[in-house]
Amino acid sequence: MLNFLRLSSLADVSEMLWADGPVSALIAGGTDLLVRPERLASARILIDISNLTELGGIGVTPDGDLRIGAAVTHQEIADDDTVRRHAHLLAQACAQVGSVQIRNRGTLGGNLANASPAGDSIPALLCLEARVALVARERGRAVPINEFFVGPAKTVMQVDELIESVRIPLRRGRWVSFFEKAGQRKGMCCSKASVAFLAQRHGDRRLTGVRVALGAVAPTAIRVPAAEAALEGQVLTLERARAAAEACREAARAIDDIRSTRDYRREAVSALLLQGLLPLYDRMRALARPRRRSRRRR
Amino acid sequence: MDKTPSVVGARVKRIDAEDKVAGRTLYPSDKTLPGMLWVEVVRAAHPHARIREIDVKPALEVPGVVRVLTHRDVPGENAFGIQIQDMPVLCFDRVRYLGDAVALVGAETRQAAREGARRVRVDYEVLEPITDPEAAMAPGAVALHPKGNIMHQGHFEKGDLAAGFACCAVIVENDYSVPMIDHAFLETEAGISYYDEHGRLTVDACGQYIYRDQTQIARALGLPLHQVRVMAPIVGGAFGGKDEVTVQIHLALMTFHTQRPCRMVATREESIVSHTKRHPVKMSYKTGADRQGNLLCVQARFVADTGAYASLGGPVLNVMMEHAAGPYRVPNVKVDGYAVYTNNGFSGAFRGFGCTQACVGLESQMDLMAAALRLDPLKFREQNVLHKGDLAGLGYPMTCEVGAGRTVRSAQRGALYRSRRRRAPAKPATPSLKPYLRRGVGVATQMQGLGLGIGIPDYAEVGLDLRPDGTLQLRAGTNEIGQGAYTAYLQILSGRLGVPLSRLSMVGADTALTPDSGTTTASRTIFAVGKAVELAAEKLERVLGERAERAFGWAPGPARLQGDQLAGSGGRRPLRELLGDEELSVQAVFHVPVAEREMGDGLPHRFYSFGTHVAEVEVNTLTGEIAVTAVEAHLDGGKVISRTGFEGQSEGGIAQGIGYALMEEVRLEGGRFLTTNFHTYVIPTSLDVPEDLRTVPVEVREPEGPYGAKGISETAMVGVTPAVLNAIADALGVRFFRLPVRAEDVLAALQEKKT
Ligand SMILES: Cc1cc2nc3c(=O)[nH]c(=O)nc-3n(C[C@H](O)[C@H](O)[C@H](O)COP(=O)(O)OP(=O)(O)OC[C@H]3O[C@@H](n4cnc5c(N)ncnc54)[C@H](O)[C@@H]3O)c2cc1C
């Protein structure tokens, strides 16, 4: 018998988890949980957290973080102006999750707790150096995103903990970013490989604060310091873009599975980075040329 | 002057649209009955094993389990199969694929039924699975069936191949491999069973031919036909995958033994494991043409993996061989085909029915020959297409109307083909440069036999009831399977009788109410059933005329309906004066004309549809991803009856053809399925199908069909796959011989090309 519970406060949920952690499962959008009957089978209580106001909302905290509630959906993130202003990369990634239906239900918290190596929000959050705010009955902690995942489907969360929100430090300056993914098809598609990129763009065409992260090519999403180093503090050139792409290929610890092959995944992360950098390269060259007539209108 | 009434060929709203959109339509998986039992199947635990013992006791101990059935409980013949009854209803000595049914559990709840199914203990002696068809064919291989593993073979020869090749300026020889694919119908196998008010054992479930299902149920249960009733008016998709019996006999068996209504709904995992698939085929083609571009030789060899049981594997192979030389005039042809038993699932009917596979090989060859001869691909095809009276590949004359050439010319005039020299994509997704995208345009021409072919009874009977108020009800035994045929039947009826659609209604697929209209397969229903509708309309007017002659003294001749009035030589009279309160029913049957000489089961056909597809792709040379960006379909299905249905078939066919080309593949390892559901078995989504879809009717009227109509549902799909393949080759200068062509394959091929 499976019980479905909807509680009115985070405190009640924490209480439940503390008491019945092992036999209860949280459900937010249900887009991961409901398609995995084996995981449902071990649960006796489903606790719906999608309606908890404490887990909702997008805003800037007094200490200067962008806070996104765990139960916020991918679509809400993709459409949100605050996110687009301060963490455009995350909006770009969330906009590419699944399909309209999945984005309307699936949540950021679910994506993180699910801890799939292919979760699309994760490489973006790695670049953005986010922290995952966890709460339990009488304690709370913020785990840097790069310490949150332990392996496929494994996180540092304790049975009585849940994700309250994701915190992203605000940035100054002009930033460029992209999220590129390759899958078996265009819609409703689990990434075979993905690349998130973030960098600060300067008037002299240099890039700093370069962050490159890969999804689906290692047990957890990974940053690629070598690729970042290849671009850091430099003007973007095709050679540098290729070097960074090569570094991604080297960094990938991919596997063969039903969706793709190890070799393809390694090629794909390199290709995806290039694919994302090429338009950036074009754009930056165009910006550098003085007084171009065909300035893109807003 | 075209005297076709305007309702024929029009875009009309489907009669089932509103109920379906509003969710009111009851599909087989929606149906429930009070007091029903859930039925679950215990399926084979191994793709190949001997059964030593089946112990049902542990299952019976599960609370809620009412009955467990095994082979001992099959009162009639424990065998089924459309053509050869080689498939056990419930296995007794051996299992041959993972979908084999070993026992049935009937329980008060689905959970109890599942738990019961889990508890049935089957003691197996596991045998080595036979997974390679070539090895299965070899002498000394372990036989899966008494007559050996070659389920069916065919050999045809025409002309003198050696002499023909000697005259060729270009000879192209290649091996091709196409995968097993799943129909991916939306609704899994489902239905209910019960005893109806007349005591008939009734099965209301998915299916594609109620009268044959009735025969198969009756045979297995040892019942006379009239004690079995089968219904399947509305089915949630099939594409051939529900042609063979699925849940019907199991449902009937449980109701028979428990006297209770029963229900089954397969999970997707169970569905994928159990139902037929498209045959995976390894084929070799050697073809040649002379310097002037005349196709002289086609030599083909097919090895089709038919899996564990026959189903329609024989006819599928026959159709593959029949279409091996495609819609072309070829003097020298040699075709060898084998359908081989293995433990790889089991294969059978699927949209295109064998033609699909052959077309992939042949249309690739056509492009390769055209390139070698430096000929335009469509000109090369046009030069060689069949015309009426020509001898087809296997040597019989084409006696139907042949629109192949017209579809080619229509494609030549189309915008897509005329743009084929352009290399760069027309509208890159973003304004920035994408130098890594390569554009290509490809074509394929195709023909597809219509109906069941010679030797397999192919007829359609319908009933027509006229009510005293002048409204009519059509009764036809075929299914509404998503294709919209019921609406098209009424369009034909409306056209013939001059009665508006609003006064017509439809009763479908119930052996107790509707005559035998034949199968809902083989692109045949508009053609065969539609023709029967025409005949019924004519008969009705004749009968009305005769009765008006007797009753009102009108001059002999047909009478016409005008609202609730009857019009004829004697003017107009209210219909009620003739019919009183009674209804007037007529039946009409159309026997589909057949070829002059039979060459094998269903071989050849007398009628064919034709089509030329043009596809545009953009290949991303960085990631290897392929996007189909436009497709034009130039289809000769004769006169179009329902424009909406015609376009629907075409667009669905395009999606399915793209899936076959780029992503779909049922993957097996040692007879076990690796792609177990839609999570891993991927089919195209709406984002994978181009927005730019154009369907151009090329209406070459076939006088034998209703208003000159033929069928379109398979032609709409078959040519798409090779057109996409040819477009990829055009884009990259690299050709693929194995489907599906995935990004992985593209990158590997591009790397190989570089080195
Ligand atoms: C068709 C389809 C396509 C998909 N495509 C993509 C895709 O393109 N990219 C992608 O990344 N994912 C994809 N997914 C996966 C899924 O949609 C996402 O991972 C989504 O973000 C999950 O969120 P949810 O709210 O639905 O999670 P749920 O299913 O509700 O929960 C998933 C897991 O997280 C736990 N959980 C949920 N919220 C919390 C919380 N606040 N604290 C602690 N634990 C929590 C649950 O207990 C459960 O174990 C797809 C899924 C489907 C079915």
Image (tube, coloured by chain):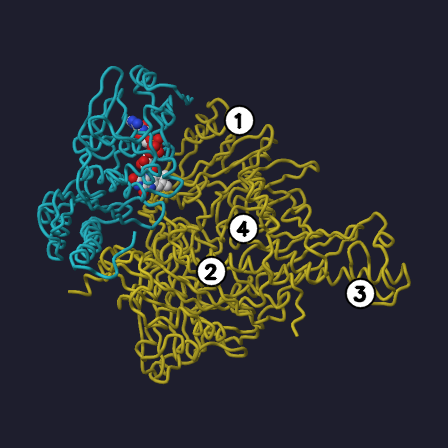
Categorize mark 1 by other alpha carbons within 10 Å: few (<14), some (14-19), many (20+): some
**Residue A32 visible to an observer of this rendering:** no
| Nearer to the camera, B316 or A34 | A34
Q: How many marks?
A: 4
Q: CA distance from mark 1 to mark 4?
A: 32 Å
- The label nearer to you, 2 versus 3, is 3
Q: Given contact means CB atoms under 8 Å apart, are the residues at marks 2 and 1 in contact? A: no
**Residue type marked 4:** Gly
Residue under pointer 3: B558
Categorize mark 4 by other alpha carbons within 10 Å: few (<14), some (14-19), many (20+): some
Q: Position of residue B296 (x, y in %)?
A: 39, 80
Which chain letter goes with mark 1? B
Residue under pointer 1: B108
Question: What colour denotes chain B?
Answer: yellow
Does the residue tagged 1 have its C-beta within 8 Å of any atom of ligand 1?
A: no
Mark closer to the chain start, 2 or 3 = 2
Residue under pointer 4: B482
